[in-house]
Image (spheres, rainbow, N blue to C red):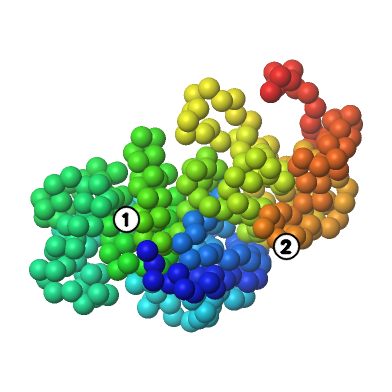
Amino acid sequence: MAAADANNEPLLVVEDYEVGFRTERGLARAVDKVSFELDRGETLGIVGESGSGKSVLNRGIMGLVSSNRMIEDGSVLFDGGQMVNRNRQEFWGAKIGMIFQDPMTSLNPVMKIGKQIFEPLRQHLGLDKGEAETRAIELLTQVGIPEPARRIKQYPHELSGGMRQRVMIAIALAAEPEMLIADEPTTALDVTVQKYILDLLRQLQLDRGMAMTLITHDLGVARGRTDNVMVMYGGRVMEHAPTDTIFAEMRHPYTEALLASVPSLKHAKHTRLTPIPGAPPDIVNPPPGCRFSPRCKYAQPKCTEQAPELNEGEHRYACFYPVGTDASAEALEKNMAQGHTATGLKIGLAPAKAAG
Ligand SMILES: Nc1ncnc2c1ncn2[C@@H]1O[C@H](COP(=O)(O)OP(=O)(O)O)[C@@H](O)[C@H]1O
Ligand code: SF4
Ligand SMILES: [Mg+2]
């Protein structure tokens, strides 16, 4: 288990964190005043449609956004130390490990797998060649790679996608980081391999008492594999709660819509999916009021005038008419009766969907 158990302070404290990109049209606010905490050993699912700011948030925290048009503001404390606006290279691999969607972009195609695992071991842990090799074989065994002694002599292209992703995980874990960032780690893999890798990650995370952010556009991926879920939309946090609460008592209409729009890993073929109407917001000129209002079936005039604030507490959400309350039931009824929402989104009982 992590030696850090004695320390009850959260591992990561993010406050009003912002990442913007200067564009010809103005500032693109990819991450807009995001605040959250990550406890030691916690797994946080970060969920949202493509473009909602999940990757920029995590890459930004790590100092990995390489753009001279980028502006960063706010505060990110890792283990009590400020990360914003400083070089964060010392954290890479050593304190925070990272795995990405496509292992081929992170693996060196012309270097044998063994060497790619030895390097961080020798660098961060000061192991000699023999020790590093033994440890590399151990790591590959832990991530479920058969015949590890043979594999370390191979090149990335000689492995399947799933095996490459396991190698990435082994590399990310080599220096025993306190936190792992897994950015859509299985999006490029087929469903069976996907499930294996996700379950493996969860197991390794639990065994090591390591904190993890699991980034995914698929809410189903977070189910059963995370402690908490944070839902992002247009660079903002819409909802953040314990995972069970998110699935059983979601409050934000975007979370509800997201859940209805993605197939679950379990019932891939039999669930009727309801796509979210419209498109994610323009982050240079977001819609006035609530960012989700143009696509929200509950939207009322107030939603177009004022931006709802996130409430405090264990279950955070930013919405004037939270799902499951009388207020939202009335709002929906009103919109159904008039056939559209306050933003003009047409709604009603479309014949084909009446039963769903
Ligand atoms: N280097 C960059 N320059 C300008 N805009 C960027 C850059 N990187 C990302 N963005 C924009 O930031 C927004 C958030 O992107 P991203 O974090 O990758 O979304 P997600 O990971 O949730 O799919 C998107 O609108 C994207 O176009
Ligand atoms: S009900 Fe209003 S505040 Fe809540 S998500 Fe919909 S538009 Fe936003
Ligand atoms: Mg992304």
- Determine whether 80 is above or below 34 in the image: below
**What amino acid does circle 1 point to?**
Ile
Specify whether 217 is left or right of 177.
right
Pinpoint residue 102: horizontal percent, then vertical percent: 36, 51
Instruction: Choose top left, top right, bottom left or bottom right for residue 69.
Output: bottom right
Q: Residue at x 14, y 64 (%)?
A: 133
Marker disc for residue 193:
none
Specify whether 293 is left or right of 69.
right
Alpha-carbon distance for marks 1 and 2? Answer: 35 Å
Pinpoint residue 187: horizontal percent, then vertical percent: 42, 44
Q: Residue at x 79, y 57 (%)?
A: 308
Mark whose residue sits in front, 1 or 2: 2
Q: Which numbered disc flags the more N-terminal residue, 1 or 2?
A: 1
**What amino acid does circle 2 point to?**
Glu
Callout 2: SS: loop
Badge 2 local density, few (<14 within 10 Å), some, or many (20+)?
few
Which quadrant: the N terminus? Answer: bottom left
Which quadrant: the C terminus? Answer: top right
- Determine whether 168 is above or below 244 in the image: below
Pinpoint residue 235: horizontal percent, then vertical percent: 63, 59
| Residue identified by numbered label 2 | 312
Q: Residue at x 52, y 42 (%)?
A: 223
Callout 1: SS: helix
Specify whether 154 is left or right of 40.
left
| Residue identified by numbered label 1 | 169
